[in-house]
Image: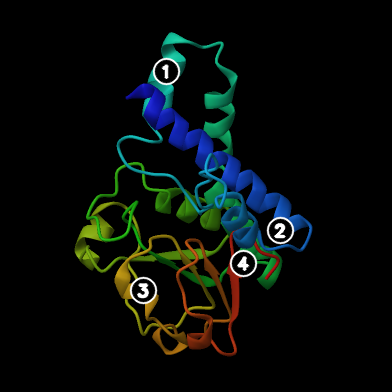
Amino acid sequence: KLAETTYRDVNIAFANELAIVAERHGLDIGPVIQASNSQPYSHIHSPGISVGGHCIPVYPHFLLAGAPEARLPAVARQINDAMPAHAVSRLEGAMGALRGLRVAVLGLAYRGGVREHAFSGAYDVVRALEALGAVALVHDPLYSSQEIAGFGLEPYALGEPCAAAILHTDHLDYRTLDASAIPGVEVVVDGRGVLDPSNWSGVRLLHIGTAG
């Protein structure tokens, strides 16, 4: 179990490293990963905004507790832990200063379709936004506003105005969203690569692992 879970964490970290390199060089990492995985022994995962849940972000620490000399698991954890702040940095790069701006964080759950927020990267997205002075608001179709507020977060309802949004969780409900769901939105960071660009005309749509 430790080896299998840590392998997945390291694999995701490699995908995230490739994604960041692609962004810096103005490339799209998606076709690169697809071409790599056409080979029988390549199984690179998809990059994304965070790694959450009870297993993948946790079990590598169990492995490291018994083998502190293991280098890859520790580095992978650092890379994956930094992705929520990286997504916020991409938003800041597109919008400029975020201080005072309302930013919707779409998804509290760590994975789409799962009502579980253990070790969810949404908390790190909120912290990174608040560190830059933004007003972070959280929406999730699987949680009520009262539940979200109970977790110490400020709830958001679709239809309320926001200057920007960050999609954290790939819920099916979000895949069909369009710009009318977030009045006034200028930039959206699609942290899972699931939004339909044709639904976001006039909005700058950013992805993990692409220049745009």
Residue type, numbered disc 4: Leu
The answer, for residue 96, to whether it is visible in the render is no
Q: Secondary structure at mark 1?
A: helix
Residue type, numbered disc 1: Leu
Give percent across and percent down for residue 140: 30, 65
The residue drawn where x is 60% and y is 70% is: 206
Residue type, numbered disc 2: Glu
The residue drawn where x is 41% and y is 35% is: 57
The residue drawn where x is 41% and y is 53% is: 122
Q: Earlier in the sequence, mark 3 or mark 4?
A: 4
Residue underneath mark 1 = 63
Q: Are marks 3 and 4 in contact (CB under 8 Å)?
A: no
Q: Nearer the viewer, mark 3 or mark 4?
A: 3
Give the CA distance from mark 4 to mark 2.
Answer: 21 Å
Q: Earlier in the sequence, mark 3 or mark 2?
A: 2
Q: Nearer the viewer, mark 4 or mark 2?
A: 2
The correct choice, above or below, for 36 with respect to 1 in the image is below
Give the CA distance from mark 1 to mark 4.
Answer: 38 Å
Q: Please give the label number shown on residue 98.
A: 4
Residue underneath mark 3 = 174
The residue drawn where x is 55% and y is 15% is: 70
Q: Residue furthest front?
A: 40
Give percent across and percent down for residue 41: 53, 39
Q: Earlier in the sequence, mark 1 or mark 3?
A: 1
Q: Secondary structure at mark 4?
A: loop
The correct choice, above or below, for 16 with respect to 89 in the image is above
The answer, for residue 50, to whether it is visible in the render is yes
Q: Quadrant of residue 59?
A: top left
Q: Crowdedness of circle 4 by 10 Å Cα count: few (<14), some, many (20+)?
A: many
